[in-house]
Every structure is written in C-alpha cells, then in structure tokens.
Amino acid sequence: MKRIVILISGHGSNMQALLEAKLPCQVVAVISNRSDAQGLKIARAHHVTTAVVSHRDFAERESFDAALSKEIDSFQPDLVVLAGFMRILTNGFVEHYAGRLINIHPSLLPAYAGVNTHERALRDGVKIHGCTVHFVTSDLDNGPIIIQAAVPVLINDSPASLAARVLHEEHRVLQQAVRWLCNKQLWLDELGRIASDHFEQVGATLISPGLD
Ligand code: GRF
C-alpha cells in the first residue's frame, strides 16, 4: 500500500478530506511548518502521526527545507501531498521529490499562480474560476496538471464566498488525484508529461453566467 505524507500550514480541510476519503493508501504522517496549525488536531483525532518543522527555527530556506525533507523521509513516503502548505520550496527539495510531490492550488492554473487568487479573479471580473492539482516542479505553480475543477463566479461573490465554492471542489479533486496516483492510473512519463491508462472523459460544459 502506498505511503503518503501530507504537508499543511493551516486549517487542513484538504488533508481532512483525504483522511475521510478511504483512499487505497496509508497516510503515514501529517507535517506542518506551524505548531498552531488547526489541521494537526484533526490529524491526531484520526490517529495519524504528526510532526512540526517550524520555518521560524531556520535562518534560511535551504536549511528549513533540509530539515523538512529529513522529517518527511523518516516516514519513507511514496507520495508527498502539499495540502494548504504555504511555503515556497527550494529547487533542491522539489528535485528530491520529483514525480511524487503534488499540490492543490486555488485557481485554474496557469491563471492566477501565486497568492490571493480569489481576490485577483474577482478584480479581473472572470466568470469562471476553480482549482488545480498538479505535480510540483521548480517552476512555481506551473507543474504538470493532474486534474482541475471549474466553478462559476457569481455576481455578488466576495473573496470568501468564492473561496468556499472553490474549496469544496478542492476536496473532491485532490482525493481523486491521490486515488489515481495510488492506483497507478496516472503517472509522469519520462518526458515529465502526465500519462494515464484511465480517464473518464466527461462532456460537462460550464457557462457562466448561465444562458437564458
Ligand atoms: C485552500 O484554498 C488551499 O488551496 C490553499 O489554502 C487553502 C486552505 O487549505 N493552499 P486547507 O483548508 O488548509 O486545506
């Protein structure tokens, strides 16, 4: 059974969705860079081992990443999932986990890479927004895309209401991505492209605002 380590920084709702999804894999640890991350309590309540590697204890990014990597490797993961993990990782760290490091990002990448995605989407007046699960590469928020979900932006949306609508879909697509990876139904080929032997191609079209 594949071993998974989940990295969090805050609420951990994406981590919780994975723990409750009865995935064909074993979550062997939840690690946070913040000792006050709410998600640590949720992980403990699910009897999952937790650890904290605080970025505040390290003078620079490289030494933090080295300590984080050492902690992660002590659990011998097959897959590392960034689930609301709010640190930018060094190239050395990313290369060490190449092909087995994924992230959930709250936008339809490549649109709105970076932070404050919902505010930026609203400011631009886009009518469709969403989330993306992707492999992590040294190119921030720009690795091979595994799965995406699109949601309508509603006329009276605030960043909070839009974020909530996106977050609901994050929970759905992150567990789907992990399930495909655990079942070896999806992988990165030798050229670093997404490969799969299993895709339910759906024809659903999202038009926003809706047609009359
Ligand atoms: C989510 O929108 C995630 O995409 C972003 O942080 C938010 C909170 O995630 N990185 P979680 O509740 O901590 O999983």
Image (tube, helix red, strand yellow):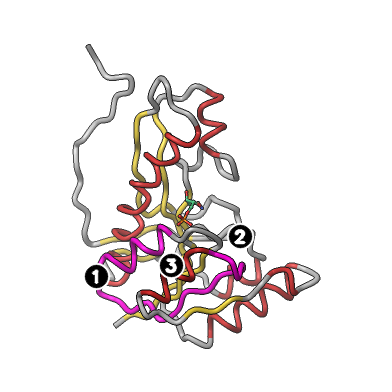
On screen, residue 80 versus residue 119, left or right, reads left
- Callout 2 crowding tier (Cα within 10 Å): few <14, some 14–19, many ≥20: some
Up-down relation of residue 155 to residue 112 (above or below): above
**Res 120 quadrant in image:** top right
Label 1 CB less than 8 angstroms from ligand 1: no
Residue 25 falls within the magenta-colored stretch: yes
Label 3 CB less than 8 angstroms from ligand 1: no
Please state which amino acid type lies under the numbered disc 3: Glu
Label 3, label 2: how far apart the Cα atoms are: 17 Å
Residue plotted at (32% across, 68% down): 181
Q: Which mark is residue 138?
A: 2
Q: Are the residues tagged 3 and 2 within 8 Å (C-beta)? A: no
Which residue is under mark 3? 190
Q: Quadrant of the N terminus?
A: bottom left
Up-down relation of residue 120 to residue 59 (above or below): above
Which residue is under mark 1? 22
On screen, residue 141 versus residue 102, left or right, reads right
